[in-house]
Image (cartoon, coloured by chain):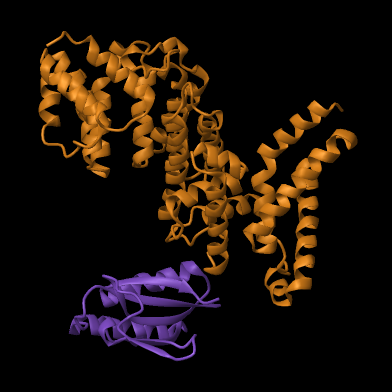
Chain colours: A purple, B orange
Amino acid sequence: MAQYLLSVITDSLDLATPEEMAAIDVFNDRMIADGHWVFAGGLGGPDTATVIDNRGERAVVTDGPFVETKEFLIGFWIVEAADLDAALRLATDGSKACNRKVEVRPFL
Amino acid sequence: MSATDAADAVARVHRAEWARVVATLARRFGDLDVAEEAAAEAFATAVERWPADGVPPNPGAWLTTAAHRKAIDRLRREAKRAEKQREALMPSDAPEPLGAVDDDRLRLIFTCCHPALAVETRVALTLRMVGGLTVSEIASAFLVQEAAMGRRITRAKEKIRAARIPYRVPASEDLPDRVAGVLTVLYLIFNEGYLASGPGVPPVRGELTAEAIRLTRLVRALLPADGEAAGLLALMLLTEARRTARVSASGELVALDEQDRGAWNRELIAEGHALVRERLASGRPPGRYQILAAINAVHTDARDIRDTGWSQVVALYDQLARLDPSPIVRLNRAIAVAELDGPEVALAQLDGLPLTGYRPFHAARAELLRRVGRSEESRAAYDAALALAGNAQETAHLVRRRDQLAGP
């Protein structure tokens, strides 16, 4: 088994609608039942981000995300899956449930 | 054995056995890079040894054994550097299922054509891993720098490993989509060779049609029940049969109605027709490639353009339009309608098609307008076609046709 990060990508700060929340709950329950679930969470928007760079002598604090983009990360799942095909199937259902794009990346 | 004979033997065995050797090793070692490198080294050893030792009685087995040893050597070398990697790469102890050899090649094809890879990457990876073309050959076929093509293939292998793109035939619920994806890759390879064939084109590029046909034969043999694999093979054969007649000695595209039909390859046509008949006899509803093959079968059945069964062609385009209601299908249907119901009817059907950026649309309009005597508009349509990018043979053809029109 390998782990994958399923990132939820959006271009709007609108919260999930009640219908989307209900579909996400169903999807989460099924992932738990099928043994795919590791962790999941929703995030604040890019405006709530703060970047710290402490590679130099002093930590530099910057308001905002590390890069401004039209689309951004708004939530994620970490899942266990046998291979990319299995992870893509989960992402396909997850995207449908939350009604947003989902990026799949393997943990190394 | 002479050096030339041995070189010929290696070339022949390379065509026949490369995919099998790579596929077998990829399954044993679970890594495409290891498989590819070991296979290449084994073939290099054959080039050195066979002229002196002779070609072994079972060259495929010889190469697989040699490549297996090369792979183990590499893994041992790497094991000294990284213990962890050794564990990841060591061959599994799972017993090899019987008759798995052909399955291995199918696995290899599905891995190379995985939808998580970009289309141009799937094409390059399939030509390298399954076709056995060198990186430099693939680069020159696609007119990119060898280093860039090398990076593309390396990145693909890294993604396959890191993201765990599985090395297996997809689950049955995914199979139709995934087979369609494989056929798309093969058709892209074919078209890349076909559309660019003619004088001044690097030979490797022209050979892509032969390579595409070879790979499609393999997929057809591995998936004998798949109608679209048979359809695509038939479509390629019937297209390839006309390849030499399609470009003149001076490097100009020759339209279907002007082609020397005696120069068509009868052997390929017979094979293509047999496949189309086989699909018709199956009674199953045909997919896109089978319908396109049937259209090409009608064209290649006519000894003279006037003998073409145009009503059959139009009926087949109707069937295709139901699967794929794209404007390009409607354009091609209209071209056939012109032969059946006249150019005026066809022109009316072209009106409003959203294809103003598509060269064949303007070329078809120009020909139809010319036939109804609207020379001015025809000339403007040729100019519109020429203003869009296209290959040199096509351009030469359009310029000649335009310049034949009476001056304004």
Q: Is residue B24 left or right of residue B118?
A: right
Q: Residue furthest front?
A: A57
Q: Residue pushed farthest bottom?
A: A58
Location of residue A46 by image quarter: bottom left
Q: Residue at x 34, y 42 (%)?
A: B285
Q: How many marks?
A: 0
Residue A20, x across and y down, in percent: 23, 80
The quadrant in which the N terminus of chain B is found is: top right
For residue B28, side relative to residue B205 (left or right):
right
Quadrant of the drawing holding the C terminus of chain B:
top left
> What is the quadrant of residue B166 in the picture?
bottom right
- Residue B33, relative to residue B265: is it above or below? below
Q: Residue at x 18, y 36 (%)?
A: B356
Q: Position of residue B13 (x, y in %)?
A: 72, 37
What residue is drawn where x is 34% and y is 19%? B396
Q: Is residue B366 left or right of residue B272?
A: left
Would you place residue B238 above or below residue B42 in this image?
above
Residue B270 visible: yes
Does residue B99 appear anywhere in the picture? no
B271 displayed left or right of B8: left
Q: Is residue B73 above or below residue B327?
A: below
Q: Where residue B61 sits in the image (x, y, percent)?
A: 78, 47
Residue B133: horizontal and vertical position, in percent? 61, 41
> Which residue is nearer to you in this view: B297 or A91?
A91
Q: Residue at x 76, y 52 (%)?
A: B67
